[in-house]
Amino acid sequence: MKSNDEILTLFENYLAQMQLPEEPQLLYQPIIYAMSAGGKRIRPTLLLLCCDAFGGDVREAMSAAAAVEMFHNFTLLHDDIMDNAMVRRGKPSVYAEWGENVAILSGDAMMIYAYKLLRNVPDEKLPRILSIFSEMALQVCEGQQYDMDFEQLQKVSVAEYMNMIELKTSVLLAGAAMIGALMGDASEEDARKIYRYALELGLAFQLQDDLLDSYGSEQTLGKRIGGDILEGKKTCLMLNAMSHASEQDREILRTTHLDATLTDQEKIARVKAVYDRYDIPRIINQQITTRFDRALSILTTLDITQERTTHLKTFAENLMGREK
Amino acid sequence: MKSNDEILTLFENYLAQMQLPEEPQLLYQPIIYAMSAGGKRIRPTLLLLCCDAFGGDVREAMSAAAAVEMFHNFTLLHDDIMDNAMVRRGKPSVYAEWGENVAILSGDAMMIYAYKLLRNVPDEKLPRILSIFSEMALQVCEGQQYDMDFEQLQKVSVAEYMNMIELKTSVLLAGAAMIGALMGDASEEDARKIYRYALELGLAFQLQDDLLDSYGSEQTLGKRIGGDILEGKKTCLMLNAMSHASEQDREILRTTHLDATLTDQEKIARVKAVYDRYDIPRIINQQITTRFDRALSILTTLDITQERTTHLKTFAENLMGREK
């Protein structure tokens, strides 16, 4: 069995030898730029780990892993246009570097290229894996649309928010994991369990992401704390607080980020005071732990030896930044 | 065997009963709007005719036909953003109606949905048809990029132009035809011939489209003549003329559309005078006839009776607006 690091190295090597066409340059250069800008390769790593856990040959699963990574990067290209985002992974986004038309069209080509890579899945597995991939891809689009919808809505429930982040981010991790399991000849039942494992893990990760944005340490995170609060973003902290708070406190949550008389630090402190009053950090932490534990416990129910799930446990701990 | 009209009716019925999800509305409403806005359904009709010609069951090929039509409409959604085009088929474009972000994301979902539809191809045919589809889709993106590149270039050769329109428009018709033939259990050799038939036909159609824009009748076309000339567009007329003309005439071709002292009618007349001087309409007409005849003659080499190719001949004649 291969460790997370071994898998990652194999995958980076695979990507490095992948030959994209050279012409037209304005179509393919941005794809190469985006794919070689790094990122944590979370989804392909998990896909390959799942394949390996069930005793599959990770070399056979490389192109499916690359398909998932290509698809993920395609979503970033188009999201950056929609969000008007100029920076991605510390470098100019494709949108900033080449403009909107190139970002649209190169993104389109990336999505098609993902399917082209997926074609290399062995024929007998292709129908099932193609179904999973398209279903997952469509759900990611649905999640992105809900996310944009929510920006315009006055009121979003916690349940609606959880559904949105499940679609927008967790489903892709879950689909990648399931494809990997099937590439490793897991039974349909185990593949579904692996899907749930990754879905719970993805949700735990996203909740933690929201929590750290307001309560993390700037050193560990490498960015300023409180960005979501200053944007007035509807995060799980905000929506949980809105559902618990008094009308007076809800007014603070709704309006503080717009209050021009306050400094950024005052805004952050004021909103966090409301969060703290309703014990929101503890509530969210509990939700994270519940989901994380659920993910790990699913691993104990698989039809493989516990030893074979070791690296999937490590993957989960690494993703959440937890030491064993 | 089914006629063009019978096939079209069957396909429209299939589309009408297709159930897209209802939520999120801003993702799926634009797709329904685009798909029900009509259009000539050229590609799915050809796909189904090819399937039928080889004795295949057109009902089995419906979802592949819908995949091709969905993909075509996806390209229109994104092209309209890139071209800043507000009108499509006499109605506001999705871009005009819902804005850019919706047009990007709904377009993405349409492309994924096309692959989802393609999944319904019988398992044993799926690997080959998926390959053809992705290759074709990628070439369409390449063609669109070359088209945008050419707008910025001083000099484009006739050969480069022919390559661009082949990628941008003919390849989709050719891929649709080939998928249809394979759905009808055509041999690989016949499927390749059908591809060539549709490719030549697509090129003939595109050349005629350029020719009619300057030399057609406004009544038949339903739009003003000379639009390409007024835009200074690099059409096959323009590029053939540039390759034949004297330096003095080339200057006229390059600058007339920018000359503010001329009326539209004067601009059109001046450029057409240069075209006529070098016999460009006759040259292009000859190219159209050559390609059209080549397309039809390929049909005589197929491993099926001539009677079975009747509707493919009719399709070609209808597409070119030629009576039998």
Image (cartoon, coloured by chain):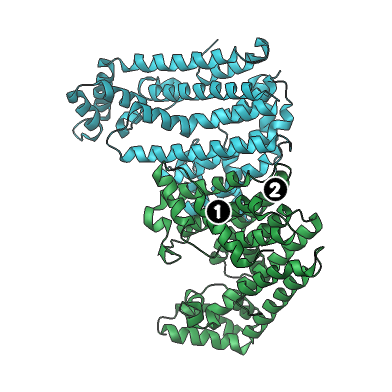
Chain colours: A green, B cyan
Q: Residue B234 location, x and y as percent?
A: 33, 31
**Residue to which mark 1 is pinned:** A14
Both marks 1 and 2 on one chain: yes
Q: Chain of mark 2?
A: A
x 55%, y 88%: residue: A273
Viewport quadrant of the C terminus of chain A: bottom right
**Residue to which mark 2 is pinned:** A131
x 62%, y 22%: residue: B189
Answer with the quarter of the image where residue B85 lies.
Answer: top left
Q: Kindly identify which numbered label has been placed on residue A35.
A: none
Secondary structure at badge 2 equals helix
Asked if residue A118 is positioned above or below residue B278 in the image, the reply reads below
Q: Residue B44 location, x and y as percent?
A: 62, 30
Asked if residue A76 is positioned above or below residue B202 in the image, the reply reads below
The residue carrying pointer 2 sits among few (fewer than 14), some (14 to 19) or many (20 or more) residues within 10 Å by Cα, namely some
Name the kind of residue labelled 1 in the image.
Answer: Tyr
Name the kind of residue labelled 2 in the image.
Answer: Ser
The residue carrying pointer 1 sits among few (fewer than 14), some (14 to 19) or many (20 or more) residues within 10 Å by Cα, namely some
